[in-house]
Amino acid sequence: MSKANIAISACLLGHNCRYDGKAKYYPKVELLKDKYNLIPICPEVLGGLPTPRVASEIVSNKVLREDGLDNTLYFNEGAKRALAIYKENNCIFAILKESSPSCGSNLVHDGSFSGKKIKGIGFTARQFMQEGITIYTEEDIDMLLEEDKNE
C-alpha cells in the first residue's frame, strides 16, 4: 500500500527557510515518515522572499516587515503556490508551523514585533482553511502518531 501525502512546513523538517535563516526542526516529524510522504512547503520562499529576510507580522489585513514595508503580495503569492503544491501532490492534510504569519492556524504574532502572540490565522493557513483542508500544527504531532498506533 502506498503512503498518503501530507504537506508540512519545511522549517519543521529542518530546512533553513525561516526569516532568520534558521529552521524550527521538530524531530518527531521523522516518526510520521513511516506512514506518510512529507511534502515540504515554505510559503514565504515560494512567494519570492529571500532567506534570511526582515521579520514580518500581520497588521490588520496586511503583512508588514519590521521596517514597515508591505510584504502582503509575497504572502498571498506564497499561499497560492503552497496550495498548488498541496493539490498537485493530492495531500490529505497539512502540518503548518504555529505562530507564523504564513502558517499559523491558531496563533500569530500581534504585529508589534515584541514577541507577543494573539489568536489569529496566517495567510497560507487561511487559504488552506477556505479550501476545506485540515490543518494540524507541530503541537498535534503526538496526537497524529497516537492515531496511527490505533489504526
Image (cartoon, grey):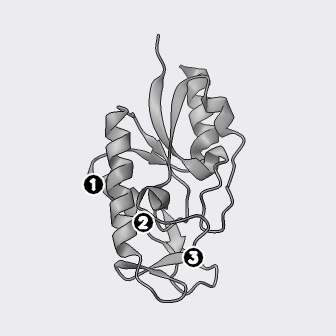
Using the image, determine if residue 57 lies above or below residue 34: below
Question: Badge 1: few (under 14), some or many (20 or more) residues near its Cα, within 10 Å?
Answer: few
- Left or right, 88 with respect to 137, comes to left
Secondary structure type for disc 2: loop
Residue 142 found in image quarter: top right
Residue 115 found in image quarter: bottom right
Give whichever of discs 1 and 3 has the lower sequence position: 3
- Looking at numbered disc 1 in the image, what kind of residue is underneath it? Gln
- Looking at numbered disc 3 in the image, what kind of residue is underneath it? Ala
| Gap in angstroms between the C-alphas marked 1 and 3 | 26 Å
Secondary structure type for disc 1: helix
Q: Residue at x 40, y 61 (%)?
A: 47
Q: Residue at x 27, y 54 (%)?
A: 130
Q: Which label is found at residue 52?
A: none
Secondary structure type for disc 3: loop
Question: What residue is disc 1 on?
Answer: 130
Q: Which label is found at residue 55?
A: 3
One can see residue 105 in this view: no
- Looking at numbered disc 2 in the image, what kind of residue is underneath it? Ile
